[in-house]
Amino acid sequence: MKIIFASNNNNKIREIRHVLGGSFTLLSLNDIKMDEDIAENEATLEGNALQKARHIFRITGMNVFADDTGLEVEALNGQPGVHSARFAGDAKDSDANIIKLLDLMNDSINRNARFRTVIALILEGKEYLFEGNVNGRIIREKRGREGFGYDPVFIPEGKSRTFAEMDLNEKNRISHRARAFEKLKSFLADHMENQ
């Protein structure tokens, strides 16, 4: 089955290809010669994921999924949330986002946070949503060179290392994105079996 992942984020595409394995032919926006930056101006992760999937489906008519992920920090009343990628501005600069996050948290004792990923799938014209979460805490300075986004300052619950200190295999066993995509993978596998 061919399916489009409505993203040009090479880090995400690499993670998702790893999770989905060889069961599906995963096409990125680059693979279908689309380099536009799809709008993400909805008020929720669900809204943004659906907005992106619907946009690509309207253009291609192909099966498509899109995701949106947010870091939700308790001490910041759930911020940056839906604004995670652009927290420090439209440049989507991960270092600037982390600096802003740590500045706002300053000496906050409550370091609890969670990553939440929502996937919107349009399969044969029908829409489906999948969600994955991972709880953890924000540390005071960056650690690690792997991953992307807020990974260098996020330690998942029950672990002592940040996502950026884990290799892809370890991260994909516990990450929010991997949990959401495992649900998607199971759903697609069931769908193919019932064809």
Image: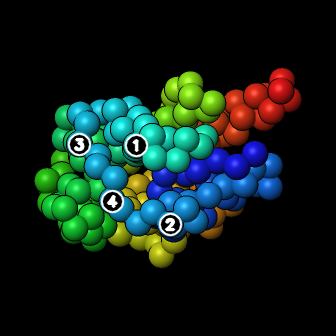
Label 3 belongs to which residue? 41
Q: Which element carries disc 2, helix, strand or loop?
A: loop
Q: Name the residue type under label 3.
A: Asn
- Closer mark to the observer between disc 4 and disc 3: 4
Query: Real-space Cα distance between discs 4 and 1?
Result: 11 Å
Residue drawn at (80%, 49%) of the image: 23
Q: Amino acid at mark 4?
A: Asp
How far apart, in angstroms, are the residues tagged by discs 2 and 1?
15 Å
Residues at marks 2 and 1 touching, judged by CB atoms closer than 8 Å: no
- From where the camera sits, is residue 157 visible? no
Callouts 3 and 1 close, C-beta under 8 Å: no
What residue sits right under mark 4 in the picture?
Answer: 37
How packed mark 3 is, by other alpha carbons closer than 10 Å (few <14, some 14-19, many 20 or more), is: few
SS at mark 3?
A: loop
To which residue does mark 2 refer?
33
Q: Residue at x 36, y 62 (%)?
A: 36
Residue 105 lies left or right of residue 5; in this view the side is left
Q: Check disc 4 and report its element: helix, strand or loop.
A: loop
Indicate left or right for 63 with 118 as reference: right
